[in-house]
């Protein structure tokens, strides 16, 4: 389907490999120029496959599975703080005969998941938590290149800038004009604020040195796996560190919010997941450990099914054909044409998935449909430009969703609640207000 004069969208499974695969010559579209500066392009913003491969060598080391697993203790520290906050929001259990959860506190679980993820990525990337959970807010110190210090709201700044950039990205040839004429826009200010947050974090980390007990992500921007200096300038460090914050924060909070939403809406699925978790965690009062839950098939299916129906990034990631053109899903496309596969639409393709609008984790365990899910559900994209934060995202989700489902029960503030989506570059959930109470695990004697 032609969705712009020079942009063709493919809801065809064969187009996935042709556009995003390892063997393709197709590169990122100028759409991504809005996310870069004139002086330096980060690993996400660069359109050059060669430059991306060079950058990925040092950035991907930080997100390697072994490094992520080794970070579990610092993640568990943030989980403990998060659970203490969640316990304070609990209503009386219905079995307490005190009016039940209907008389209790409601809170915005989506916001608290965002705060949690920012604290995790602060500790993982820079050796120091953001402190958002403790203060119950995303107010953070920031510093400009010339040393001016002030405070800003991290989540709000990121979201405003993301919405601003993704709009301007559709007219890449006019960026010099559109960005010049919209310096007043709150989204532009949001980008400057988020950059200032990263600048301060980078400066503080360079002064404090490597944290004790583990290797943070920032270390890999300074030294490669052989201990050699990577040689990035301060400006380059800020850009790549900003990518690390983005790769490990917003999309993961989005995925976890959507997963909880579908679990609360589907009691039979929630019951089945609890049976799997209770069998492993028993009466355990502390958070789930990764080793306990990493191989739980139904838990993983619940996470993946939520990302199928509501992928953190739902738009078609744009690419551009080479000058000689390209063959996409059997169709010859002329050169210099924007092409994409819309993630949201592909995930609902009835040729791939039965009852595609239904939240049904069992499809991931099915002998026929399961392989299709693993091939064509692309919440982290695919190929050489796939999201580097995938390993961290799964570890965080498996630990926290398992812990929350085992520990709490919920209801929405109203029976007819529907979670809406705010389209930025990411497809962010709106506020999700819930009432919550502690549950007793069904432990077999």
Image: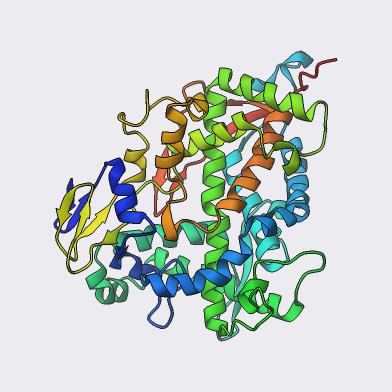
How is the rendered protein coloured?
A: rainbow
**Residue drawn 39% across and 58% down?**
22
The residue closer to the viewer here, 179 or 230, is 230
Image point 58% across, 56% down: which residue? 248
Q: 34 above or below 81?
A: below
x and y percentages locating residue 28 in the rendered image: 33, 64
Q: Position of residue 129 (x, y in %)?
A: 71, 61
- Taking the image as shown, residue 80 lies to the left or right of residue 324, namely right
| Residue 104 in sight from this viewpoint | no
Q: Is residue 157 visible?
A: yes
At horizontal 53% and vertical 59% (from top left) the residue drawn is 388
Query: Residue 282: x and y, percent?
Result: 80, 26
41 and 276: which one is in front?
A: 276
Q: Quadrant of residue 106?
A: top right
Query: Is residue 152 rendered to the left or right of residue 68?
Result: left
Q: Total number of numbered labels? A: 0
Quadrant that contains the C terminus: top right
- Residue 303: give x, y in percent of width and height: 55, 36
Q: Residue furthest right?
A: 445
In the image, 168 versus 218, the foreground residue is 218
Q: Is residue 404 above or below residue 235?
A: above
């Amino acid at each position: 389907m032609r969705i712009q004069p020079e942009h063709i969208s493919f809801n065809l499974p064969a187009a996935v490999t042709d556009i995003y695969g390892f063997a393709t010559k197709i590169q990122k579209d100028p759409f991504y120029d809005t996310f870069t500066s004139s002086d330096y392009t980060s690993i996400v913003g660069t359109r050059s496959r060669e430059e991306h491969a060079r950058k990925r060598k040092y950035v991907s080391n930080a997100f390697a599975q072994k490094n992520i697993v080794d970070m579990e203790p610092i993640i568990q520290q943030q989980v403990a703080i998060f659970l203490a906050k969640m316990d304070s929001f609990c209503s009386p259990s219905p079995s307490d005969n005190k009016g039940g959860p209907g008389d209790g506190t409601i809170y915005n679980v989506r916001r608290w998941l965002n705060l949690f993820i920012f604290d995790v990525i602060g500790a993982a990337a820079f050796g120091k938590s953001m402190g958002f959970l403790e203060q119950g807010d995303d107010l953070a110190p920031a510093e400009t290149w010339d040393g001016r210090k002030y405070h800003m709201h991290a989540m709000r700044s990121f979201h405003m800038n993301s919405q601003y950039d993704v709009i301007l990205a559709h007219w890449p040839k006019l960026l010099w004009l559109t960005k010049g004429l919209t310096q007043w826009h709150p989204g532009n200010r949001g980008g400057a604020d988020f950059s200032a947050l990263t600048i301060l974090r980078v400066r503080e980390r360079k002064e404090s040195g490597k944290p004790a007990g583990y290797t943070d992500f920032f270390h890999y921007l300074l030294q490669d796996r052989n201990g050699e200096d990577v040689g990035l300038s301060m400006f380059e460090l800020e850009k790549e560190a900003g990518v690390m914050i983005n790769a490990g924060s917003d999309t993961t909070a989005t995925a976890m919010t959507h997963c909880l939403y579908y679990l609360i809406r589907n009691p039979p699925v929630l019951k089945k997941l609890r049976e799997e978790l209770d069998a492993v965690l028993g009466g355990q009062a502390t958070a789930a450990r990764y080793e306990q839950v990493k191989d739980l098939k139904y838990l993983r299916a619940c996470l993946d099914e939520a990302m199928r129906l509501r992928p953190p990034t739902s738009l078609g990631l744009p690419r551009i054909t080479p000058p000689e053109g390209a063959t996409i899903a059997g169709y010859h496309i002329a050169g210099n044409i924007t092409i994409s596969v819309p993630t949201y639409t592909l995930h609902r393709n009835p040729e791939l998935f039965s009852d595609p609008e239904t939240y049904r984790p069992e499809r991931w365990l099915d002998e026929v449909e399961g392989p299709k899910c693993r091939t064509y559900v692309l919440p982290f994209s695919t190929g050489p430009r796939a999201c580097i934060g995938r390993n961290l995202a799964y570890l965080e989700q498996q630990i926290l969703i398992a812990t929350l489902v085992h520990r709490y029960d919920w209801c929405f503030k109203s029976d007819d609640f529907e979670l809406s989506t705010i389209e930025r570059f990411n497809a962010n959930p709106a506020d999700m207000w819930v009432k919550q109470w502690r549950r007793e695990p069904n432990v077999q004697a």
